[in-house]
Image (spheres, grey):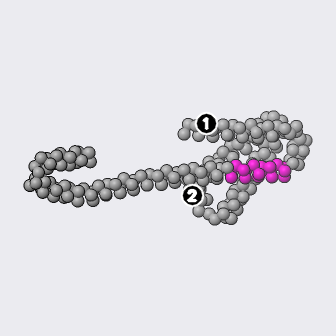
Amino acid sequence: MYLIKRINSFFWLFLLLVVLLQLSADKNLPFLSALLYAVGIVITLKVYAQMLSGRKVVESLFHLNTFVLLGTMMLLSVIVALILSLEGYVIIRLTVKEEATRIILDDSVSLFFGLFIFVVLVTGLNYSFNQYKRFLEQENELETIKRKALEMEISILRNQLSPHFTFNVLNNLQFLIIKDKGEALVMLSRYSKILRLRV
């Protein structure tokens, strides 16, 4: 669990650095604006990923057919890309001078599509990870059920065999006592050892 948390933290930090490097490549966008926008993007994506990882959301997405699932994922990706674009617009308007704002916002359509592709990638990765987690949980549950079924089957077999086995042993002892008392004592000793092993 600790390793998963570390990997998760590393992923979001890596994502922040990649987005920051991409945004700071624009010469019209100051570093502070790029940093604020990168932090906003990563926080929004993290909230979105946590929302997609919710138990009820995962269960409801799992039961959708392929076309409805793809449509839902695309719609969610468009909504998140719009939110990210709006965040960028607000941050740019608040932190960049008026002249540079127009130059930056002229590229807003290409920025939206870049964010959309990015969100689709995050959505797909998140969905794949959740499906893999679900698969592992189902495998563990199946193994537990198999183990319990096997234990129950063994218990039932022991209970079924025990009366028959005991009856046969006692019946044989009865005839051995009449025929050979020494052999009967040896058999009785073996049977008591078997009973001790079962308990």
In space, the residues marked 1 and 2 are separated at their CA atoms by 26 Å
Task: Name which residue lies at 70% across and 49% down.
Answer: 122
Q: Which of the image's four quarters has the N terminus?
A: top right
Residue in front for this viewpoint, 74 or 196: 196
Task: Name which residue lies at 59% across and 40% down.
Answer: 4
Amino acid type at circle 1 is: Arg
The reply to whether discs 1 and 2 touch (Cβ–Cβ < 8 Å) is: no
Can residue 199 be seen from the camera position used here?
no
Q: Position of residue 8 (x, y in %)?
A: 63, 40
Magenta segment includes 189: no
Residue 59, disc: 2
Task: Name which residue lies at 39% across and 54% down.
Answer: 150
Can residue 109 be seen from the camera position used here?
yes
Residue in front for this viewpoint, 27 or 68: 68
Q: Position of residue 82 (x, y in %)?
A: 76, 53
What residue is shown with label 1? 6
Mark 2 surroundings within 10 Å by alpha-carbon count, few (fewer than 14), some (14 through 19), many (20 or more) = some
In terms of secondary structure, where does tag 2 sit?
helix
Q: Position of residue 146 (x, y in %)?
A: 43, 55
Dominant secondary-structure state across the stretch colored magenta: helix
Task: Name which residue lies at 26% across and 48% down.
Answer: 198
Is 124 placed left or right of 108 in the picture?
A: left
Image-quadrant location for residue 42 = top right
| Residue at far front of view | 179
Residue in front for this viewpoint, 82 or 173: 173
Amino acid type at circle 2 is: Glu
Is 158 placed left or right of 185 in the picture?
A: right
Name which of mark 1 and mark 2 comes first in the sequence: 1
In terms of secondary structure, where does tag 1 sit?
helix
Magenta segment includes 120: yes
Q: Position of residue 190 (x, y in %)?
A: 20, 46
What range of the chain is rendered magenta?
A: 108-124
